Image (tube, rainbow, N blue to C red):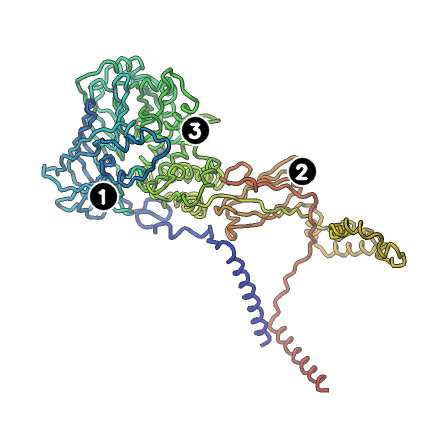
Amino acid sequence: MFNRRLFLCSVLIISLFSFSATALAGQGKAQVNQFRQLYQELPTPNAYRTASGAPGPQYWQQRADYDMSVELDEKNQRIYGIETITYFNNSPDTLTYLWLQLDQNIRTKDSLSRIASSGRISHPTSFRFLERIHSGFDGGFKIEYVKDNKDRDLHYTVVDTMMRVDLPQALSPYSQYSFQIKWWYNINDKSKIGGRSGFDYYEKDGNHVFAIAQFFPRMAVYNETEGWQHKQFLGSGEFALPFGNYRVRITIPSDHILGATGTLQNPDEVLTASQQARLEDARDSTENTVFIVTEDEAVQNEAEGADKTKTWIFEAENVRDFAFASSRKFIWDAMAVKFGERTVLAMSFYTKEGNPLWEKYSTKAVAHAIKVYSKFTFDYPYSKAISVLAGRGGGMEYPMIAFNGGKTEPDGTYSEGLKYSLIGVVIHEFGHNFFPMIVNSDERQWAWMDEGLNTFVEYLAEQEWEREFEEGNGTAYSMIEYMKGDKKYMSPIMTAPDADLHVGSNAYAKTAAGLNILRETIMGRELFDFAFKEYAQRWKFKHPTPADFFRTLEDASGLDLDWFWRGWFFGTDHVDLAIDNVKWCKVNTMEPALAKAIDYEKKNRNRKHYISNIRNKKDIEKTALEKDKSLSDFYDEHDPLEVTPLDEKQYKKYLESLSEEEKQLLQAGYNYYEVSLLNNGGMVMPVILKFDYSDGSEEVKRIPAEIWRRYNDSVQKVFVTKKEVRQITLDPFLETADVDTRNNMWTLQEKPDYFKLKKFERPSEKNLMQKVKEMEEEKKKEKHDEKISLR
Ligand SMILES: [Zn+2]
């Protein structure tokens, strides 16, 4: 029973203790552990998508083939088309209707995007803003008909930017269905109405550059995660598209030069003999660009004009979209990138208004990007990659072709900023061939999966282009200002772009910076590059989801990155780690002279305080002791620092009690630094500490983020070194996006604190026999006490 009583007692003590601990915690912010696993946030793995992040054994995806004839009416800026879509239902589901995307409908007068747009009058307001409000532009698809392959009308319903086509008979699994759509629309003037595609009008010579995309009704994605992906096109969220094969006939004015997705099928009919010969030369030119159409030829061409037309025929296999650019103003150059026997042509189509910048950089930047992206993912599989000068700035990407802004000044000069933004945008828009054109993610929902991954590889390509390439998006450091921002207006990266106020900062910059932090700081280049490549290879020509990316990076690297995805992708906390305190400690060896000096110092420290040291010296003329020498005894006269034979004897005894290993530890003379760290921002990160030693040398120690796994807010760690530390700096290379570096530095105190070493032996638990014996002795004692009290 005695034993039980003791047990109860300790329970009481423990519960009292834990109660007070809970009460304390209640005063602060509740800790929702950053290291709890990501389970609720990710879909359950299944036969379509495995827990490792790879396509599963029953993975399937739909396919849509297009056979199209398109005519460009330059005079009226219109485009007409007839398309036959063959839809392959590779799903195990029976489909009673199909959904198509009518992206042009964003420009109808009553589109959801226009009606639901918000806006305010700023001071001053631009003409462009008012022009857009007043615009009477008659945009959007004019659907003339939707017919089946027996020429029978199909019932269809347009829902803003989507169209449902009802099937007369349900489309059973693993079967296909062909139908035809006839349409036309007015092409938008990009400078007035805006848009990813449209035309640029050159007033001086009265010519157009047509950059045509999202120009035909396109199949929506149907898959096992979304069903039909028919979230409306509101402007920010881009596209989700199935793969397929294309055959496209494009009729344009006969003096136009045209660049498009796919391989030109009839060069003899649309190119001159010399143009064809030059194109052949370009296929052998891996160092320099070759002109297919020179600037002089283009200038001559743009002055003439033609009434006749030509039809260019293109075929493309396994692409998710099709776009083209057409103008009589185009200069055209190309060069080759070799993958073994295979040749990829890097090409540019641009007007003289882009020179000399474009002829110098555009095609070479494409060729450079082809090589760097291939290194980090997989060999670029298509036969060509085109950069087209279209628009004032920015860029837009399609399979094998991208529209990039960047005109020079009329006198042929250009700013340094324009140079780097052109090289950057050419690399970036080419890079979209990998993400999302081939690694075909859903842009409408997850802008970061293409923009972020692409901005990250763009950063790598830019670093390989020029050592001091102007750093834009992509570094941790570049995120600091954004991450400091008001959390009220911030969304996690895992937010659909149309609902995100900061798509640029989140989808592009924060994602790219996060990947850079993973590569440089958390995973290391070797593990990261392997895992990133694995993701690209697993999902090329497939449709990955966010979970597939998160899982693959963990699966291939052997690292648990849940904390990182949670903090960086699912959260808005910023990084602000701080050094709260550093204690410098040394071992008190108990060697008498040192031990006495330490004791004396400790005692004296108390005497040094203000009252006894300064005020009393002034106010008390003489103490009793000073007046009366007879009050003095041994303690006043003896030297506290004197080492006596007794001290020596005790020290010797102490040493004898130690093992050889213990003696070594005692006398090695190490410096111990107890570093206290705070996590003020909320987002945990690896702790990178630079130690500056007093001998002038330095050392960097890297501690993984798991140091925070139990205590997310504050943690301590002891560092041991032979050298003395002068200063400690946290995140010395600014690689974690720490928003406040003022609390990242600590200068060491002058003297160390000494600590004693003692032998620590855990008292062994009493065995039952001992306890019974004790109990009996206790009883005996009680009886004895009784007897005494009876007396
Ligand atoms: Zn982009």
Image x and y of residue 409, in percent = 37, 19
The image quarter containing residue 11 is bottom right
* Camera-side mark, 1 or 2: 2
**Along the horizontal axis of the image, is 756 left or right of 21?**
right
- In the image, which disc is placed on residue 90? 1
Asked if residue 107 can be seen in this view, the reply is yes
Q: How crowded is the residue under tag 3: few (<14 C-alpha within 10 Å), some, or many (20+)?
A: many
- In the image, which disc is placed on residue 756? none
Which residue is identified by label 2? Answer: 694
Tell me: residue 158, above or below residue 249: below
* Mark 3 vs ligand 1: CB below 8 Å: no
Upstream in the sequence, badge 3 or badge 1? 1
Which residue is identified by label 3? Answer: 462
Could you tell me how far apart the alpha carbons at marks 3 and 1 are, in whole angstroms? 40 Å
Query: Which residue: 61% across, 67% down?
Result: 765
Image x and y of residue 328, in percent = 25, 18
Could you tell me how far apart the alpha carbons at marks 2 and 3 are, in whole angstroms? 39 Å
- Say what amino acid the circle numbered 1 marks: Asn
Assign the C terminus to one quadrant of the image.
Answer: bottom right
Image x and y of residue 142, in percent = 17, 34
Upstream in the sequence, badge 2 or badge 3? 3
Tell me: residue 124, above or below residue 573: above
The image quarter containing residue 442 is top left
Q: How crowded is the residue under tag 1: few (<14 C-alpha within 10 Å), some, or many (20+)?
A: some
Badge 1 marks a residue whose secondary structure is loop
Considering depth in this image, is 530 or 493 the residue closer to the camera? Answer: 493
